[in-house]
Image (cartoon, coloured by chain):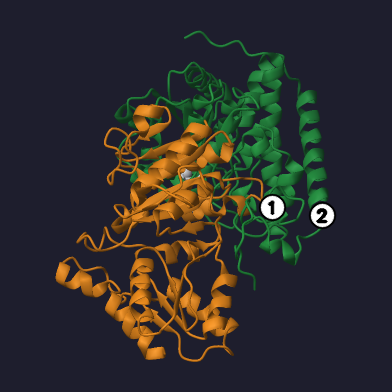
């Protein structure tokens, strides 16, 4: 396979996106620690290359379904971080008006079908989006992001099989970060890669180094083009690692410090990509510092927006349960 | 209305599906054996031939996947799926998609998503189908915020309510009583919509109110006809949709008659029957002249043997007894 030619502009977008996700997540961790962000927060630090490398091949009209660890997908797809940050805080200006929180951030206007609190729950949603695309004769695609743990769920097996028999334009991206909370991948499945499962559904499947954004970009490009050309679904396993606990507050007693340090030192996707861009003279140290600063400012602006936004009102509790109003009692009040 | 032709409940549902498939390209169907086979109960016969496999998806047994696909397709706004769950009893293998995904998406997403989809399923006892193929379960679905729940009793209600359900922008659980599929009744040829949330007074009366659903509507009407000869005037109300609920019609009737019997085929605890009783207690307390009676099955799984099943299902005799006890 020939290496795809990627424009400098796209490469820089990829770098900026990864930095943006990293800065966002590290700031979210602080905000959680300060008790400003309630609930469960699952961060994407260390996995930035996966969402970025995949979404770099998508256009606005394409769809993605996301997971409980969904900030990275949302940011890469072009989600407004003010709206998501306000959502993390539970403010009325949030993308879900404060009714969803970290596990439910969404932006349907850019094809982001929503994060999901149920592991594996979003996988068939991407397949459904792909069915809509196909029946409407569109050339869009849908991507389902999910974890290694999710690849044990019925929705993984059923979703992939339905997509395969109906030849739908969808790409399944398994972010194998080695753990399902505390259970290592080796104790979840006796195969070496989730990609081995592609064969049982008769679809192409590949495993890729998820810390190498270029590698992710390349395999995703092939799978997405295949889907766009009406050739059906594919499965990608991106081997990755989360640099933080499963959720914020997780003491992570199930893995060694040594293991974590090894990944941080040798497999940080941002460091790896930055090195490549420096070598190619696409980026200088100054550019990189500037990008970092710019992203920090953007995130800070989002935090300010969230902090200064109003709380939702009590009467909002009753709103948005249904879309079509009817006769009779639809929503029982207090 | 002159000569309205009579067709079966199953045919009426087929006509509603056919009508919506013909009028709206976004409407598609997903389910098991709904194509070539025409549906386990023959409800979808002919639709595959007419609309082809790109609109009528015969699916492998993967209910969670199928509903999930329907939800995703609905969320994009590109399609309005009608998913057929062969038996409502099978909700157990796909409930997450129903109540955590379809039902809550709009709310969790702050009103941004529209999940325009219908989950059609066959329910109901009386066929000797035992505990895993006989439940009605509308109570449970009505317990869960975000779902609309429809349980039609007559062919004409089934057609009109299904058209409205498909046109509705929220997830609707549409439970068809399989004991009624062969029941015939007058059904207008034209696509007459019956709005959700409007109860139908199947028979007017002044001494006692019976609120009944699905197959129990017929048994209640039988009792009403019989007792009318003795001078007992029974009003029979079929709410038709459990969510939304036409509380006004029910409350006004109870206030008028001062007596209530709820007849329902679903389990008795935390149920549709207790829900209506609670409404009567909280909104009609002053007008009630006697205790509310609930005629339901016992809180047991549904037994197989015809000898047991017929005892399990509320009978005409039990309804009559309940009425007499509070008169
Ligand atoms: C159906 C379901 N079971 C369990 C959980 C609790 N839970 C949340 S995240 C998680 C682990 C998911 O692992 P994986 O899919 O590998 O994703 P990761 O967290 O590693 O990104 C579990 C068990 C859940 N949310 N949903
Ligand atoms: Mg994992």
Give coordinates of residue A235: x percent, y percent: 43, 28
Viewer-side residue, B294 vs A259: B294
The answer as to whether callout 2 falls within 8 Å of ligand 1 is no
* Residue holding disc 1: A88
Q: Specify the colour of chain B.
A: orange
Q: Quadrant of residue A291?
A: top right
Residue extending furthest toward the top: A2
Residue A253 in sight from this viewpoint? no
Q: Are marks 1 and 2 on the same chain?
A: yes
Q: Specify the colour of chain A.
A: green
Q: Mark 1: which secondary structure?
A: helix
Viewer-side residue, A304 vs B57: B57
Q: Which mark is residue A309?
A: 2
Q: Give the residue drawn at x 70%, y 51%.
A: A87
In contact (CB < 8 Å): disc 1 and disc 2: no
Q: Chain of mark 2?
A: A
Give coordinates of residue B189: x percent, y percent: 45, 43
Rendered position, A55 above or below B143: above
Q: Give the residue drawn at x 64%, y 43%.
A: A106
Q: Which mark is residue B125?
A: none
């Amino acid at each position: 396979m020939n290496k795809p030619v990627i424009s400098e502009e796209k490469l820089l977008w990829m770098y900026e996106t990864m930095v943006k996700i990293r800065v966002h997540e590290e700031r979210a961790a602080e905000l959680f620690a300060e008790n400003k962000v309630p609930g469960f927060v699952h961060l994407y630090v260390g996995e930035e290359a996966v969402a970025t490398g995949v979404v770099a091949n998508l256009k606005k009209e394409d769809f993605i379904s996301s997971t409980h660890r969904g900030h990275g997908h949302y940011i890469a797809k072009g989600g407004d971080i003010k709206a998501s940050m306000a959502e993390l805080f539970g403010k009325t200006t949030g993308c879900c008006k404060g009714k969803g929180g970290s596990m439910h951030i969404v932006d349907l206007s850019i094809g982001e079908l929503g994060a999901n609190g149920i592991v594996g729950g979003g996988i068939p949603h991407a397949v459904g989006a792909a069915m809509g695309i196909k029946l409407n004769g569109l050339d869009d695609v849908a991507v389902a992001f999910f974890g290694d743990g999710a690849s044990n769920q019925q929705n993984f097996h059923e979703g992939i099989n339905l997509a395969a028999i109906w030849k739908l334009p969808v790409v399944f991206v398994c972010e194998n970060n080695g753990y399902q909370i505390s259970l290592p991948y080796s104790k979840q499945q006796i195969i070496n890669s989730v990609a081995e499962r592609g064969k049982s559904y008769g679809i192409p499947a590949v495993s890729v180094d998820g810390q190498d954004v270029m590698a992710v970009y390349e395999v995703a490009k092939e799978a997405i083009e295949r889907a766009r050309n009406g050739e059906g679904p594919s499965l990608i396993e991106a081997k990755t690692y989360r640099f933080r606990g499963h959720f914020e507050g997780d003491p992570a007693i199930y893995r060694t410090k040594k293991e974590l340090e090894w990944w941080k030192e040798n497999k940080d996707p941002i460091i790896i990509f930055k090195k490549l861009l420096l070598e190619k003279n696409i980026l200088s140290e100054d550019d990189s510092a500037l990008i970092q600063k710019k992203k920090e400012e953007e995130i800070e602006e989002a935090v300010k927006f969230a902090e200064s936004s109003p709380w939702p009102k009590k009467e909002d509790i009753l709103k948005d349960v249904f879309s079509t109003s009817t006769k009779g009692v639809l929503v029982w009040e207090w | 209305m002159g000569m309205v032709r009579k067709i079966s409940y199953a045919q009426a549902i087929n006509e509603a599906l056919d009508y919506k498939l013909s009028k709206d390209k976004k409407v598609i169907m997903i389910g098991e054996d709904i194509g070539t086979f025409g549906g386990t109960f023959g409800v979808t016969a002919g639709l595959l031939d007419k609309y082809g496999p790109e609109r009528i998806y015969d699916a492998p047994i993967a209910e969670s996947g199928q509903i999930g696909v329907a939800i995703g397709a609905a969320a994009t706004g590109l399609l309005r799926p009608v998913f057929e769950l062969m038996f409502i009893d099978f909700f157990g293998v796909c409930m997450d998609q129903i109540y955590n995904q379809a039902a809550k998406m709009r709310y969790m997403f702050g009103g941004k998503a529209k999940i325009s989809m219908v989950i059609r399923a066959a329910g109901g006892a009386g066929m000797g189908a035992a505990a895993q193929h006989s439940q009605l379960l509308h109570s449970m679905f009505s317990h869960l915020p975000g779902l609309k729940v429809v349980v039609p009793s007559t062919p004409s209600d089934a057609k009109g309510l299904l058209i409205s359900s498909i046109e509705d922008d929220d997830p609707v659980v549409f439970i068809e009583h399989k004991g009624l599929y062969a029941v015939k009744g007058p059904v207008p040829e034209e696509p007459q919509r019956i709005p959700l949330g409007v109860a139908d007074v199947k028979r007017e009366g002044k001494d006692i109110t019976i609120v009944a659903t699905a197959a129990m509507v017929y048994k209640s009407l039988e009792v009403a006809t019989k007792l009318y000869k003795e001078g007992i005037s029974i009003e029979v109300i079929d709410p038709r949709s459990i969510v939304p609920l036409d509380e006004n019609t029910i409350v006004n009737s109870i206030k008028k008659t001062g007596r209530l019997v709820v007849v329902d085929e679903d389990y008795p605890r935390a149920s549709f029957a207790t829900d209506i009783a609670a409404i009567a207690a909280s909104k009609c307390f002053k007008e009630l002249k006697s205790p509310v009676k609930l005629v339901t099955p016992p809180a047991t799984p549904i037994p197989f043997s015809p000898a047991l099943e017929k005892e399990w299902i509320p009978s005409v005799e039990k309804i009559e007894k309940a009425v007499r006890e509070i008169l």
